[in-house]
Image (cartoon, rainbow, N blue to C red):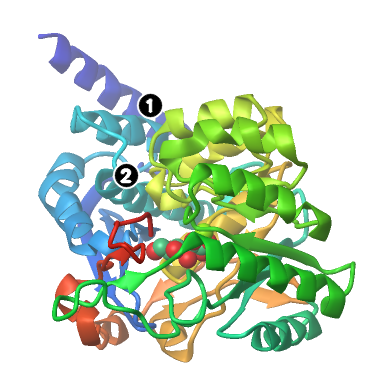
């Protein structure tokens, strides 16, 4: 009895809105998933088609290590749930999807919800004939400052890459260097040891050699690249907490723009100790899926940059709220922007960068030709700033025929059987560590 009443009231108000607006509210006619890996990384994009000809939208749902599970979450659970519903009720649908699984805040379901959420914002922008940033109150800045990655097996290689990046007018550079005989994050591997002869080869990493070599890297960075360039580094949660406190302190002299993921989500309590021991700016968040992970860090001012992966948080709708919370506590944004974010996701990042007063920096991945063959409308970078493409919605069109040319499964080598997933990283004694 009660449900029918609210559904009837809901439809009646929709009719009233249609009459008042003089245009009908589109309904969700189909929900489909585009999977492609033109740049070798598995990307997942949700497409929502409406009952109005030519009106559809795209959203990023990329969780590359478990991409197929996100596809199933959309097809098996969100599609039947969404068909026939109005596309304009974005917040309502977000809450409905979020609560529909009862258990919530996980990487697979959040990415599936994100794909739908971002597609609905795309539809609303296309309907309004405006870029999504206009729907969020318009630009606070013309473009968003980016950072780019300089990496190499040896320090001189990293310095050369950094100079090339600086020559393009880019003002912030991430520095990562390999560790001889080990598997460092963000830099070319220099030969993995096998822990147990004859068994599967797992990567080996030792925190001591990594920390010492990275300190040499930043000494060289300041010496060779000068005091002005902003430099940053990603620990990728590879240090035991006590060492992370020491490392952040030892790096203080090199005036980093920020130090990222010095701790794993499981050890965020140690941020208090890093704060108590040094002034190195701290960034965290790409691994967060649950509001409890970011709220206390932001409210207690234990980080300076929030680095959430927008689709891992559930899309544009929740990420906007994270940005607004962070603004109240002087925490700036640095949305996660690696190669395992689709071009749609990069557009969502840039949109948030332009409309959030507390914008900090945007991690940027430059597109390959194959990626541009599939995705048209990738935001453009000029003199170290990325600009919106100024087209309605996200302004991205997908060539689905080209997307089909790059199906999942192109991985080679020991990763092939892992379906885009990652292997294992171990200490020299065989202990498994965070990736
Ligand atoms: C970064 C990240 C990435 C992640 C990757 C996981 O700062 O860009 O740490 O490199 O490791 O996105 O799939
Ligand atoms: Mg990172």
Report how far apart the C-alphas of labels 1 and 2 lie in the structure: 33 Å
Residue 391 lies, with reference to residue 99, above or below; the image says below
Residue 178 visible, this angle: yes
The one nearer the camera, 214 or 347, is 214
Residue beneath disc 2? 110
Of badges 1 and 2, the one in the foreground is 2
Numbered badge on residue 310: none
Q: Residue furthest top?
A: 1
Q: Residues within 10 Å of mark 1 (few under 14, many from 20)?
A: few
Q: Secondary structure at mark 2?
A: helix
Tell whether 32 sits left or right of 261.
left
Residue 10 sits above or below residue 392 on the image: above
Rendered image: mark on residue 16:
1
Number of residues whose C-alpha sits closer than 10 Å to that of mark 2, classed few (under 14), some (14–19) or many (20 or more): many
* Closer-to-camera residue (94/202): 202
Residue 23 sits in quarter: top left
State left or right for residue 428 relative to residue 387.
left
């Amino acid at each position: 009895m009660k449900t029918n009443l609210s559904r009837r009231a809901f439809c009646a108000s929709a009719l009233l809105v249609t009459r008042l607006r003089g245009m009908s509210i589109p309904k969700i006619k189909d929900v489909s998933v585009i999977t492609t890996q033109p740049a070798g990384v598995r990307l997942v994009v949700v497409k929502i088609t409406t009952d109005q000809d030519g009106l559809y939208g795209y959203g990023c749902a990329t969780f590359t290590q478990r991409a197929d599970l996100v596809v199933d979450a959309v097809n098996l659970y969100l599609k039947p749930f969404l068909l026939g519903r109005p596309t304009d009720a974005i917040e309502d649908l977000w809450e409905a999807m979020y609560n529909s699984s009862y258990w919530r805040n996980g990487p697979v379901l959040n990415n599936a919800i994100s794909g739908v959420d971002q597609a609905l914002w795309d539809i609303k922008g296309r309907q309004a004939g405006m870029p999504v940033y206009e729907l969020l109150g318009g630009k606070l800045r013309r473009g968003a400052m980016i950072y780019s990655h300089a990496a190499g097996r040896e320090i001189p290689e990293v310095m050369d890459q950094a100079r090339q990046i600086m020559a393009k007018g880019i003002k912030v550079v991430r520095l990562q260097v390999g560790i001889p005989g080990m598997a460092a994050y963000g830099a070319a591997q220099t030969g993995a040891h096998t822990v147990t002869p004859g068994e599967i080869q797992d990567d080996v990493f030792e925190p001591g050699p990594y920390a010492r070599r990275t300190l040499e890297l930043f000494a060289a960075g300041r010496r060779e690249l000068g005091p002005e360039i902003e430099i940053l580094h990603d620990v990728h949660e590879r240090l035991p907490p006590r060492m992370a406190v020491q490392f952040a302190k030892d790096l203080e002299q090199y005036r980093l723009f920020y130090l990222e993921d010095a701790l794993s989500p499981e050890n965020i309590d140690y941020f208090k100790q890093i704060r108590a021991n040094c002034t190195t700016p701290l960034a965290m968040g790409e691994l967060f899926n649950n509001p409890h992970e970011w709220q206390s860090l932001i409210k207690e001012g234990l980080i300076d940059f929030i680095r959430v992966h927008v689709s891992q948080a559930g899309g544009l709708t929740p990420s906007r709220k994270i940005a607004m919370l962070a603004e109240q506590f002087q925490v700036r944004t640095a949305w996660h922007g690696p190669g395992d974010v689709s071009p749609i996701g990069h557009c969502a990042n840039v949109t948030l960068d332009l409309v959030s007063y507390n914008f900090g920096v945007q991690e940027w991945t430059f597109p390959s030709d194959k990626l541009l063959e599939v995705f048209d409308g990738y935001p453009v970078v000029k003199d170290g700033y990325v600009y919106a493409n100024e087209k309605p919605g996200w302004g991205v069109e997908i060539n689905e025929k080209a997307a089909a040319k790059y199906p999942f499964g192109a991985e080679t080598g020991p990763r092939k059987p892992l379906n885009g997933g990652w292997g294992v990283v171990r200490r020299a004694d065989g202990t498994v560590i965070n990736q």
